[in-house]
Structure formats: structure tokens, C-alpha cells
Amino acid sequence: MQVNIPLKKTVDNSYDISIEALKKNHFDTKVAIVTNPKVAGLHLAYLLSFISAKELFIITISDGEEYKNQESVDTILESLFNHRFNRKSMLIAFGGGVIGDMTGYAASIYQRGIDFIQIPTTLLSQVDASVGGKTGMNNAYGKNLIGAFHQPKAVFIDPYFLNTLAPREFGAGVAEMVKMAITFDKEFFEFLESAELKDKEVLAKAIKKAVQTKASVVAKDEKEHGLRAALNYGHTFAHVIENETDYKEFLHGEAVAIGMIMANEVSVSLGLMNEDEALRVKRFLQKYNLPTSYKIKNENSFYEAFFLDKKSSDESITFILARGIGEVEIKNDVERSLIISALNKFGDLI
């Protein structure tokens, strides 16, 4: 005996990404803006000049990747309960990738899901983290191992917020931007190579292109069953680096920069990328003062940590590798000895 539950249906999770100065928005419901002290101090007054709501609350959580944890998520949830938010209420993520990920995750689980909007304030979050609906938090085992796919209702990218961005944060955003160019668009990479990204008009074009690239991939593979995994180029290595350094030594984009260099070492060993192409990528990253080296203390433990990557399985590790510049290959059959050999080159660094 069986009972069928016919749940086949089409759900439209489409939304718009606006790349322009903020406009006035009023929300006829309870709204909470989730931010951190640094962003609030710099930009909250500016945001509040554009946002109004039936009831508006501010939730402030600590700044930094090391605070992307259950305690911070609980802080958001407790505030929502205390202010009696319901399923028609909404959150606004106002900050970088950490704020966006945790706000989106809290929205996905509060009363089984409420709406949220992304207003990213860093270059990294504008070109990558705010787009695509990946939400989550870190734990002792690794980065973003707890989370949900929960698409925002809208994304508002205002270049104004980049005026106060620190140079390291800017570089971290460039790393996530070039990641998409290396894996999907050779012409975009060549544009970035010659572009002066400190020029506001040039940067706006680069942001738009990066967002278009990611949006195209997400539209084809929202839940990362295949193609979207390619956007994790450099991340398999980066997440291990971040966990080993307790999320305190490198910004996420900086760890991704190192991760791309490591991934390229594997690509060169497999003949997917030549040494000149790998050098072009390295020089580009160094142009923005991004780190391109990391001393691995124990190659074996570093390798074992790959198995905690969300793309991996019990018996195989999935690696996202650049095929030259502008194409990507997803491989889960790279021999352990080849990976260890590549990692050994980083273990020798001083």
C-alpha cells in the first residue's frame, strides 16, 4: 500500500539585481536590517535615508569570518522572536558576504522561511556572495557546511558603498571576480588584465559582467548539481586554508587567491593549463596585492580535509580546475599522489 503526494510544480524564484544608486523603498511589514558595527558606523544612516517600513529594527552582530557561526545566527533569530516577526516579515542583509550568508540562512529557517533582500557593501559580496541564494555558516569542521539554498527577493548593488572599502577588501573582491573570468570567459579575463579597476566606470562594467556571469550559471544550475560547482574554483583549497588559520589570517578572497594558485598547480600537472597561463593568473593576483603562497605544514592532513568539502563524497574528492583561461573542468578522479605532489611545492615555501 502506498500514498502518493503529488508535489511536482514550477516555482519561480526569479529576482532582479540592481546595479545603481539606491532608490526609496517602503515595506508594509516588519523589517530587520542585519549588519555589523563597522558597516553600521559607515553607512547605516545612508541606508536609512532610502528604507522605511511598517516597523523597522536593526540587528547588529560581530564583524568577521570567525563570527559566522551558530551563536551569531541565534542572535538574529532571538531578535526576530522578541519582535514577533511572522512569515510576512522580511530581513535585509546589509554588509559583506558574512552578513549576507548568515542573514539568508536565518531567513531560510525562521518559521520555515521568510523573505530577505541583499544590500552588499563589499566588492566580494557585490560580485559573488549576494547572488545565487547560497546561505550558511561555518563550524569546527569547515566553512559553510551548514546552510540552505534560499534565494533573495532582490539584490541592490550600490557602488557608493565601495568608497570606504579597505585595499585588502577590494583585492579580495577582485579575486572572486577573476575566478569567474578564468573559468568561464577568456575575454573577461583579458579585460580585467588591462583594466584600471580603481576607475569607477570601469569597475561598474566589471561588476556587471561578473554578476551576469554568475547569474547565467545559477539560472542553469540553482542547487549546484553540476555546472554551478565550477564557481568554486580555488575554494576547495581555500576552505582548508581558512579553517587551518581559524578564519583570522586571510580574508575569504585572499584564501581563494591562494586556492586558485594551488588549483592551477594541479591543472599544469594534468596538462590542462600551461605554465605561462598559470603565471598570467599569478601576476594578475599579485597586481592587487593578493597572497599567492601558503606554507602547508602537513600535506596529508591538508589532503584529508578535502573530504569535508561539500562537493566531495566518501571515496572521491571533486576538484574544480581551469582548462587554460576561460574554460573549466570538474574532476573527481585526480590521483592522490598528484595532489600531494602539488601540495608539496607549497610545503616547501618559507
Image (cartoon, rainbow, N blue to C red):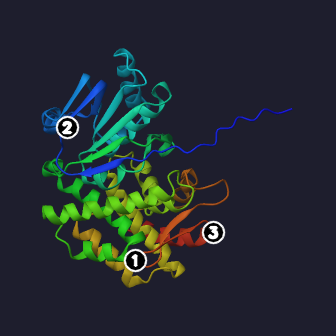
| Tags 2 and 1 touching, CB below 8 Å | no
Q: Residues within 10 Å of mark 1 (few under 14, many from 20)?
A: many
- Label 2 belongs to which residue? 38
Q: Is residue 105 visible?
A: yes
| Tags 2 and 3 touching, CB below 8 Å | no
Q: Residues within 10 Å of mark 2 (few under 14, many from 20)?
A: few
Q: Quadrant of the C terminus?
A: bottom left
Asked whether, in this view, residue 269 is left or right of residue 100, the answer is right
Residue drawn at (28%, 57%) of the image: 173
Picture coordinates of residue 324 (x, y %)? 43, 79
- Could you tell me how far apart the alpha carbons at marks 2 and 1 are, in whole angstroms? 37 Å
- Could you tell me how far apart the alpha carbons at marks 2 and 3 are, in whole angstroms? 44 Å
- Could you tell me how far apart the alpha carbons at marks 3 and 1 are, in whole angstroms? 21 Å
- Label 3 belongs to which residue? 333
Q: Quadrant of the N terminus?
A: top right
Residue type (three-letter) at the residue carrying disc 1? Ile
SS class, disc 2: helix
Q: Decide which of tag 2 and tag 3 comes sooner along the chain.
A: 2
Q: Residues within 10 Å of mark 3 (few under 14, many from 20)?
A: few
Residue type (three-letter) at the residue carrying disc 3? Asp
Q: Quadrant of residue 170?
A: bottom left
User: Nearest the camera: 89 or 303?
Assistant: 89
User: Nearest the camera: 52 or 43?
Assistant: 52
Q: Of circles 3 and 1, which is in front?
A: 1
- Label 1 belongs to which residue? 325
Residue drawn at (41%, 35%) of the image: 69
